[in-house]
Image (cartoon, helix red, strand yellow):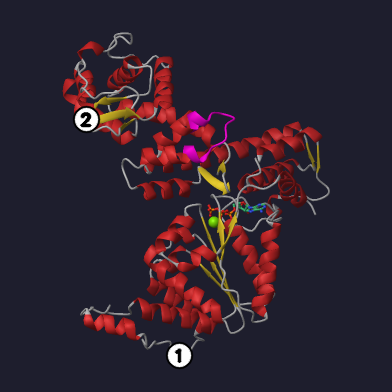
Amino acid sequence: MAISFDNNPFKPGYGALPPVLAGRDDLKNEVNRRLANAGKGDKNPTAIALIGPRGCGKTALLGWIEEKAKKRKLPVIRLTKEDFASVGDLESVLSDQVVPPNKSHDFSVEVKDPTFTGASLRGGYKRETEYNHVERKLKLKKLMAAASTKGLAILIDEAHDMPAEVGHIFYDSAQSAAQSNPIMLVIAGTPDLESVLGRSGATFVERMNTERIGRLSWEDTSRALIEPLGKNVTFDDLAKGVALRETQNYPYFIQLWGSALWNVLARKGVTHVGYEEMKEARKTFDQVRHELYNRRLHELDREGMLVPVAEIAFRIGEDGKPSRRDFIAITQKMAYTRDQWEAEEKLLHTGFIWQEGIGNWQFGIPSLATHVRKEAVSMVLDRIKEENALLSFRRIRSYFKLASKLPTSYLEENLRTVLKETSQENQADDHLAFFSELGILCPSRKPDHCLLAAPLLTEAVIEKADRLEVKPEMEPNQEPNLQTRHEPDDYTPGM
Ligand SMILES: Nc1ncnc2c1ncn2[C@@H]1O[C@H](COP(=O)(O)OP(=O)(O)OP(=O)(O)O)[C@@H](O)[C@H]1O
Ligand SMILES: [Mg+2]
């Protein structure tokens, strides 16, 4: 088959089934077995949860399962965000699957639970205008049972976006429907899914089979990249190794590299990949990867995570591996402005770092940390300049650096005094609030004390400011007068 733009087999994008869905062999075997059993009417109420960072192939796997199910003539209900915004939405999507056109079907539900009814009456409980929880669960259960006469696969994508109150009703009813009907439930979501499910209070969470969908092995990466190119395409040995390495075993990058290579071969009308072809393909790859990184970076920024995440990226360093301690350190810093669980879910959702296996923490998107380290410095510096707070930033940094060799916290009042010594006296409060919001300063455990939350990033920002020869509004070596500071009697350095 000739190589042309029109027959590019690679699918870099969201959820597209790749030409070779490499790896995940245990999961595929398990799914095949479960689909066969569901087709025979066997019941297995244990749900499968696919959990992993973005771009690792959760949606592609759901697509693969759907294909396999359809081959076995097993009905499939595939749901995504807009289908489960409310229980009402779920009811109507499921009804559509069950009720044949022009034939109405009665799914009304009689509440028989005496405890519930009694409690309602005694407490003067005001019934919901439509359905209460019990009725809703029964209705959903009936709908799923009715849809599963020939077996049924329910596939839920982006399950982390299911509101907790919807999850509570849906998962309970799905589980109880699956106890007496051949229903296979597979849900997929980002690494915050476990926490989201926990919040929904659904009991099946403890018993579900969790499959972690991360990066591929080297062998699987090789299959996914090389096989779709076909037997006619040959490589310089070095070129093949470089392309494989640069995918970093990340499924999305595999498709991106494959697609870029294919298009270069199509444009040049050749079937050999050498130095020149690699160079051209890399241009496309680098550009798209850069755009992806920027989207992620701005997302971190929007969610108020840029500074804590960049600080940890500096702390882990170029060749380091993240750990649970890093996860806790970021979320604790984020938690000054929100709840701890909210901070954890937000961070897990980005997949910046996640737990690929027990105790095995990884970066979700390869080399994003490198990009964060580089770009966060410019972004923070720009922000500081926009606020006209560079001088205050330098003073705060000097204060923390000079006042103690140890990481330490200082009375907020003292920081305010330090800032007031500059010409921008009236801005001291604004600047303190700005640094706190940015995540540079955070409250310490001591009352009214502040901590320099991102010392490594702070140094990098100052270094960049110096390098760019941003003219400070005061002499950089004119350090604040530390003698004038007052500390309370119980002050202990090192807090
Ligand atoms: N096992 C695999 N082998 C090769 N390519 C894959 C594999 N899994 C996924 N891909 C490719 O990787 C890319 C990302 O896959 P997909 O969109 O399914 O990821 P995702 O985990 O659903 O991401 P998101 O959380 O952003 O929805 C797609 O281009 C897909 O074709
Ligand atoms: Mg997806």
Q: Is residue 202 left or right of residue 336?
A: right
Residue sitting nearer the eye, 271 or 228: 228
Residue name at image x 83 percent, y 49 percent: 231
Q: Which mark is residue 104?
A: 1
Q: What residue type is disc 1 on?
A: Ser
Residue name at image x 48 percent, y 56 percent: 193
As drawn, 404 above or below 411: above
Q: What residue type is disc 2 on?
A: Asp
> How far is disc 1 from disc 2 in space, using C-alphas?
64 Å
Splitting the image into 4 quarters, where does residue 185 fall?
A: bottom right
Q: Is residue 207 left or right of residue 491?
A: right
Q: Which residues are magenta?
A: 313-326
Residue 156 screen position, x and y as percent: 52, 65
Splitting the image into 4 quarters, where does residue 15 fall?
A: bottom right
What residue is pinned by disc 2? 430
- Verify whether residue 319 appears in magenta: yes
- Verify whether residue 171 appears in magenta: no
Residue 69 screen position, x and y as percent: 65, 72
Q: Is residue 203 left or right of residue 359?
A: left
Q: Please name which of the two marks, 1 or 2, marks the residue nearer to the observer.
A: 2
Which callout, 1 or 2, points at the residue further toward the start of the chain? 1
Q: Pointer 2: residues within 10 angstroms few (<14), some, or many (20+)?
A: few
Q: Quadrant of the C terminus?
A: top left
